[in-house]
Image (tube, rainbow, N blue to C red):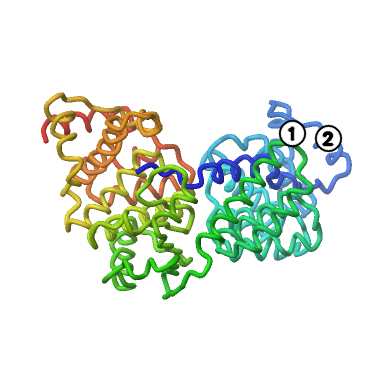
Amino acid sequence: MKKLLLLSFFLLTIITAIQAQVVLFDNFLAPADPELAKELHQYISLSEKLDKRIEELRKDAYKTGAGLDAKTNLAAFILRKLSLRRDLSFELNEDLVYEAADLLPGNPHVETVWGDLLYFSGNYEKALTHFENALYQMPDHLQLIAKCGLAAQQLMQYEKALGYFEKALKAEPDSFFLLFSAGRCNYELKYFEEAISLWEKALKIAKNEKEQRAVSDAIQAAKEMLASTDGSTKDENQRFVIHFAGNSQDDLGDITFDTLDDIFFQVTDALQFFPDVKINVVFFLTDEYYKINKDWSAGAAQGIQIMIPLKSGYKSQDYVVGLLAHEFTHTIIHLKTNNRCPLWLNEGLAQYQEFAAAYGAPEEMRYDYRSIYENEFVEKQSFIKLRDVPAYMGGSSRLNISKAYIASYLAVRCMADFYGEQSFDDVLTALGQGKSVDEAMIEATGKDMADFQVEYEEWLRNL
């Protein structure tokens, strides 16, 4: 089940975000001493000279009776050092962050750099908190407004993000980044006409062919979604918004909000994450679905939107329940980890929840996997390195693709057997905090990926 729906749209959002992203580490604190302000501009890389100057300023800032100016001078140099250490994990920088915050509690420049570091490490939720703290004190600061929008967008809080981008657009109506970002928020919220309008404005000011192609692809995707859902019906509760394209609602039988709520609680309890946004579920007629998704897939999750084809893709209620659980799991993982989950874990957890929903137990493997599992994993002992799962899934061999999915599912079962389902929450939480896959696996299992691979293969041999 390749997740290739709107692949070009994923790529263009990434490319555009990199090219036009709000500048991080731009809201610097100036030292109170004018001479130190001139000196600070000279430090464009880490150096012993910078460290020595910070130590000298510490003596002034921490002596009895030190005033605000001395603390400001030290905080300014610490913030500059932090900006130069942006590639390090937040944990390695946090002592300096806390020192700056103690020197100047609530200072908007400190809050901004604090947010920048968290954003840079992938912890968008905490980054947004610090950006908003700074914005409260500097409500007209355009970069801060855009940073809040960017962080909210990463968290898939599209209504909030759109509010920030629209506010920024009032000040800079011809900003390519703001037009594109506001368009994306409208797209995710299913306001396709608004998205098209904003993207058409962005297209007129695109600076190069890559930007033009990216925006053109986005406009085409929005137009196809608009055409495919034209005349659709909609229903919603406190957790989901369901869209029925054409007469797809007739195919659903007993699939109701009660069923979706069961899936919601199953997955959110297992992964210990409860979204504060409604999830869109779009049921398409099969022909309409494949006009949007050019490659085969049983369903797809994109952001807070799940897409399911019906008619020829509809087999049984259990099938649809399992498929919904699978895609909803992807959505929760995306939200919980800020899209930092490795493919094997993402797909493994999605299948684990799919089988639990469809068959009543996560150990009950899908019927079309069983012969491959018996032939490849049991008889031939033909295992796959988890690090190679993306290459297998991206290939053209049907057998290798299936083996990669099965390997991912079995790896998650192995984690559950050895470390309990609590390990799912542990590893996803660590990933959401910006930690590497190895660091996250150590927190969850006590083993890095290399050691877990060895343990996993031994587990497979004894199944």
| Res. 431 in view | yes
Dot 2: element: helix
Give the vertical position of 460 relative to 104 (above or below): above
Residue in the foreground of this view, choosing between 362 and 141:
362
For the C terminus, the quadrant is: top left
- Image position of 368 with respect to 355: above or below: above
Q: Where is residue 414 in the image (x, y as percent from the top left)?
A: 21, 40
Whole-percent x and y of residue 411? 25, 38
The amino acid beneath tag 2 is Glu
The residues bearing labels 2 and 1 have C-alpha atoms spaced at a distance of: 10 Å
Res 197 quadrant in image: bottom right
Going 20% across and 51% down the picture, which residue do you hit?
362
Which quadrant of the figure has residue 183?
bottom right
Q: Is 99 on the left-hand or right-hand side of 233?
A: right
Q: Which of 155 and 122 is in front in this view?
A: 155
Dots 2 and 1: beta carbons under 8 Å?
Answer: yes
Label 2: how many residues lie within 10 Å, few (<14), some (14-19) or many (20+)?
few
The quarter in which the N terminus is drawn is top left
Q: Report the residue marked by disc 2.
A: 39
* Dot placed on the residue nearer the N-terminal end, 2 or 1: 2
Query: Type of residue at label 1?
Result: Arg
x and y, in percent, of residue 194 in the image: 66, 63
Q: How crowded is mark 1: few (under 14 residues within 10 Å), some or many (20 or more)?
A: some
Foreground of the two, 41 or 358: 358
> As displayed, is residue 84 above or below residue 270?
above
Work out which residue is located at the far right of the displayed protein and give it: 34
Q: Where is residue 2 in the image (x, y as percent from the top left)?
A: 38, 42
Q: Mark 1 points at which residue?
A: 53
Horizontal relation, residue 318 to residue 194: left or right: left
SS of the residue at dot 1?
Answer: helix
Mark linked to residue 346: none
